[in-house]
Amino acid sequence: MKNPYETLGISKSASIDEIKAAYRKLAKKYHPDLNPNNKVAEERMKEINTAYEVLGDEKKRANFDQFGSADGMGGGFGGGGGGFGGMGGFDFSGMSGFSDIFEGIFGGGGMGGFGESRSKKRSAVGGDVRISMNLTFEESCLGVKKKVTFSRFERCGDCGGTGARGGSGYSTCDYCKGQGRVRQQQRLGGFGIIENVVPCSACNATGRIIKEKCNLCAGKGVTKRQVDFEVNVPAGISDGQTLNISGEGDAPLGVAEGMSGNLLIAIRVTPHPLLVRDEFDLYLELPISFTQAGAFHAAKNSAMNISVKIVI
């Protein structure tokens, strides 16, 4: 992610009031209502919202300051750039901490059995399902309950998610001995040969070899199903934000256990013809005639644009 401090144009020592002030200033400048059909402003507004979500949350801000990611240590070591990303050709994305990192390098054998306590295969996790939801301006301000219909992979009812006929037509993988992972030797420059733990390709990291495939799911362990789901949209949600509903995504493939992914809902808010939002404040722009504007200007010695602030 982009540096949220740079996005909002503030220093790392900025107070929460300074963060809010910077967000308001940029939101007024790049808000889609004030920049219709402007893709650059739309993308900039998304970056501003993301930055504020991180710095406006005490825990996420502390994680970013310490690890370079709002998710904490797990998000700070993936990919490229800083940290350990790309070191020696290893990919540390998805590893949850130092124990995973060292296990990824040494495979439990390079540091006196460091990884042996983690010999059990990781729990499988299903994929996320991404959909979008359109809201009226009023719904985004006040909150609403809405039904959404989408398709997702669910565990097969015939095989219980194993992919094997009757839920039992499989045997333990001989290659990984049912662990779902195997040790692989790799030469790393001047460090010599090290062991790296990788998913077993023989059983697709499940630890099982299917003898007879389930007729309903063809051995995948999941079937696609259309579902109706009621979403509680919180009051004050903004255009471009994403609702993350845990456990309502796809079921993992080929395993009877594991966690389903998440349902990610991208919010799209229809602009109001007169009202503009700034967090929990509403601004009403009243169209007036030139004569009325001139009279107001003469009487009040002020700008010709009239803005009425309504706090909700």
Image (cartoon, rainbow, N blue to C red):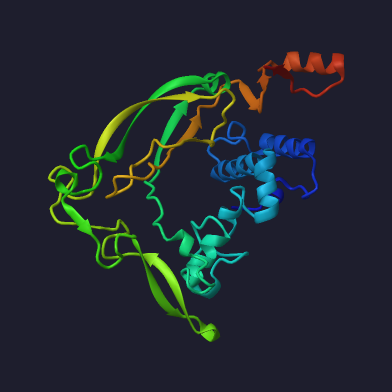
Side of 130 where 190 appears, left or right: right
Residue 304 seen by the camera: yes
Q: Residue at x 37, y 50 (%)?
A: 124
Side of 289 where 92 appears, left or right: left
Side of 197 where 176 appears, left or right: left
Please, is residue 242 above or below residue 44 in the view? Answer: above
Estimate the x, y position of residue 14 in percent, counting from the top left.
Answer: 79, 44
Q: In the depicted view, which residue is nearer to us: 252 or 144?
A: 252
Q: In the depicted view, which residue is nearer to us: 47 or 111?
A: 111
Report the number of discs.
0
Residue 256 image-quadrant placement: top left
Q: If the image is split into quadrants, where does the C terminus sit?
A: top right
Residue 264 image-quadrant placement: top left
Estimate the x, y position of residue 130 in percent, counting from the top left.
Answer: 40, 40
Residue 90 seen by the camera: no
Estimate the x, y position of residue 210 in percent, counting from the top left.
Answer: 18, 55
Side of 109 where 168 appears, left or right: left
Please, is residue 78 above or below residue 61 in the view? Answer: below
